Image: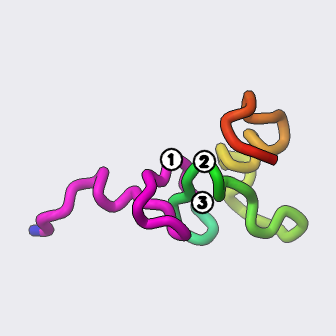
Amino acid sequence: MSATTDHDERRCARHPEREGRYYCSKYGRYLCDECMSCADPKLYCKYRSQCIIWELERYGDSGTRAR
């Protein structure tokens, strides 16, 4: 059994010191507020219809990160 908790594993892929609040199913990684953006917005993604990252970018994210 692993000594890490689920929270410990939810770290930003680019900033491991930050909480990864958003999960990219296509690449299997968490992203922080600053990094939260679709890595391949023009390429097909089978997860897009369920992707919180895509939806927040598409409809706006209420100013939770800089654009």
Which picture quadrant has residue 65? Answer: top right
For discs 1 and 3, the disc positioned in front in the rendered view: 1
Tell me, yes or no, whether the highlighted magenta stretch contains residue 16.
Answer: yes
Amino acid residing under circle 1: Arg
Q: At numbered mark 2, what does the secondary structure look like: helix, strand or loop?
A: loop
From the image, tell me which residue sits under label 1: 21
Magenta stretch: give its range.
Answer: 2-24
From the image, tell me which residue sits under label 2: 33
Judge whether 61 appears above or below 15 on screen: above
Q: Residues within 10 Å of mark 1 (few under 14, many from 20)?
A: some
Q: Position of residue 41 (x, y in %)?
A: 84, 62
Q: Residue at x 58, y 61 (%)?
A: 25
Viewer-nearest residue: 47 or 15: 15
Q: Is 42 left, or right, of 31 in this rendering?
A: right
Dot 2 and dot 1 residues touching (CB under 8 Å)? yes
From the image, tell me which residue sits under label 3: 24
Which picture quadrant has residue 18? Answer: bottom left
Q: Magenta-highlighted stretch: main secondary structure?
A: loop
Amino acid residing under circle 2: Asp
Q: Alpha carbon of mark 2 to alpha carbon of mark 1: how far?
A: 7 Å
Q: Residues within 10 Å of mark 2 (few under 14, many from 20)?
A: some
- Sequence-first tag of 3 and 2: 3
